[in-house]
Image (cartoon, coloured by chain):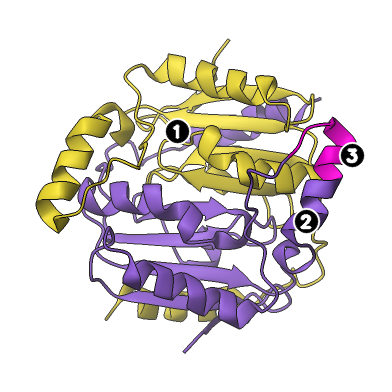
Chain colours: A yellow, B purple
Amino acid sequence: MTQAELFEEANKKYTADFQKGDLALPPARKVAVIVCMDARLDPARALGLEEGDAHVIRNAGGRASDALRSVIISQRLLGTREIVVVHHSDCGMLTFNDEVLRGIIKKETGHLADQFSFLPFSDLEESVKEDVKFLKNSPYVLDVPITGYIYDVKTGSINKVK
Amino acid sequence: MTQAELFEEANKKYTADFQKGDLALPPARKVAVIVCMDARLDPARALGLEEGDAHVIRNAGGRASDALRSVIISQRLLGTREIVVVHHSDCGMLTFNDEVLRGIIKKETGHLADQFSFLPFSDLEESVKEDVKFLKNSPYVLDVPITGYIYDVKTGSINKVK
């Protein structure tokens, strides 16, 4: 069975007692969260989000620059007025650099990958600070509260980066 | 109170009985899901995902081209071997085009936004097909099962796009 088929099975259970069909399109809590795609991190459970509450933007590393298109749409068209950035311990982005990954791609596919910037980082706390700063400095992002956290995959806790 | 402060409160409850501190970095179910950032869609609940199972990549529209960097990292460095794309009914991406949003940004910020492609779409089923095709045709993406769905925000159900 593919994972897709397993998703279809699981979704039948989800819809059996589904009672959230009347939620509005704009997020009720007017917040966008930018979180790493990491499998161990479930932003809804870890941050207490219900369906309808928040935009959840996720990518490798939870990088803000890669989320800018989505943040603009979230703020300008759908009214969010706060941003929370969450990176996490033991992140895959700490384990490589652009040159290494470009080399792997060249070897495995035969194609150059010089056009990609994979946005890895070597310091977790700095990566959060950098992403908060990126958003605060962008002329395309509204002047709203922006808070950065590191999620600890061992304990499930979020710790604010000051 | 900011949403960030509310997240800190909710996170205390999450960590109180946290028992998932030993999960591995690579996703256990070897799958990456690309899903819209929409607030009404909770991929973990809707697809039956537990912490540790899957990479979850989310952006405005659930667009595959915007997820390519993350997909490459997911496959080449962290071993995922299946992709599932999920767009949804009543998506905000159906409500505007690049020209409209660029106009809003210019008016609100004074800055040109011509460098952004916001990736809106006018046909939901076509947008899913387009994104599955994009991934299948990319020389940077492995030849793995790729399935596209439309999530119905009224019923919570996923419906495969063929």
Q: Are marks 3 and 2 in contact (CB under 8 Å)?
A: no
Q: Chain of mark 1?
A: A
Q: Chain of mark 3?
A: B
Residue placed most toward the observer, B34 or B67? B67
Please state the horizontal and vertical placement of residue A32, each as a whole percent of the image.
Answer: 68, 41
Label 3 and label 2: CA atoms lie apart by: 12 Å
Kind of residue at disc 1: Gly
Q: Is residue B86 above or below residue B157?
A: above
Please state the horizontal and vertical placement of residue A89, each as a whole percent of the image.
Answer: 36, 27
Q: Which residue is mark 1?
A: A156
Residue placed most toward the observer, B65 or B42? B65
The secondary element bearing badge 1 is classed as loop
Residue placed most toward the observer, A101 or A156? A101
Q: Is residue B110 visible?
A: yes
Residue placed most toward the observer, B110 or B136? B110
Q: Which residue is mark 3?
A: B107
Predominant SS of the magenta segment: helix
Q: Chain of mark 2?
A: B
Mark in front: 1 vs 2: 2
Q: Which residue is mark 2?
A: B99
Q: Is residue A12 above or below residue A60?
A: below
